[in-house]
Image (spheres, helix red, strand yellow):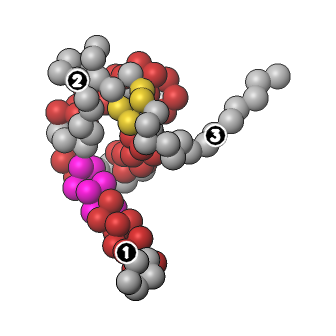
Amino acid sequence: MTTYMEGQIVDENVEFTLVELCRVSGASAEEMTLWVSEGVFEPAGERPEEWRFSGVALRRVQTAQRLAHDLEINPPGIALALDLLDEIEALRARVKRPRGA
């Protein structure tokens, strides 16, 4: 019997290599390389073997996959959509913050 577990990593200090991120997200290295070239992700490191992605990248990869596979959005559109989703999240956090804080 195989048990699968799904979760979200919220610790930004966690780092993934390209291989690790592909393994935990199910994304292919080709997808990730294309998304990096289109600005969807900005890993630390110069070459794919050196790339390091933060823990937040896992959630972004999952969202990028849904946008690509379910809605058939191209990589530049994915980059734009993720940027807009980040802005919405920042605005929501700002609205929830008490005045004077």
**Mark 2 highlights which residue?**
45
Q: CA distance from mark 1 to mark 3?
A: 29 Å
Q: Are marks 1 and 3 in contact (CB under 8 Å)?
A: no
Q: Residue at x 35, y 32 (%)?
A: 53
Indicate the position of residue 9 as horizontal and vertical percent values.
53, 42
Q: Residue furthest front?
A: 100
Q: Residue at x 25, y 29 (%)?
A: 44
Secondary element type, mark 3: loop
Secondary element type, mark 2: loop
Residue 27 among magenta residues:
no
Indicate the position of residue 60 as horizontal and vertical percent values.
39, 46
Looking at the image, residue 17 lies above or below residue 75: above
Region rendered in magenta = 78-85
Looking at the image, residue 85 lies above or below residue 100: above
Secondary element type, mark 1: helix
Q: What quarter of the picture does the N terminus occupy? A: top right
**Mark 3 highlights which residue?**
6
- Left or right placement of residue 75 versus residue 93 in this view: left
Q: Viewer-proximal residue, 65 or 61? A: 61
**Mark 1 highlights which residue?**
94
What amino acid does circle 1 point to? Answer: Arg
What amino acid does circle 2 point to? Answer: Gly
Check disc 1: other Cα within 10 Å, few if <14, some if 14-19, many if 20+: few
Indicate the position of residue 28 as horizontal and vertical percent values.
38, 25
Q: Residue at x 37, y 74 (%)?
A: 94
Overall secondary structure of the magenta section: helix
* Residue 22 seen anywhere in this rendered image of the structure: no
Check disc 2: other Cα within 10 Å, few if <14, some if 14-19, many if 20+: few
3 vs 2, front mark:
2
1 vs 3, front mark:
1
Of the numbered discs 2 and 1, the one sitting upstream in the chain is: 2
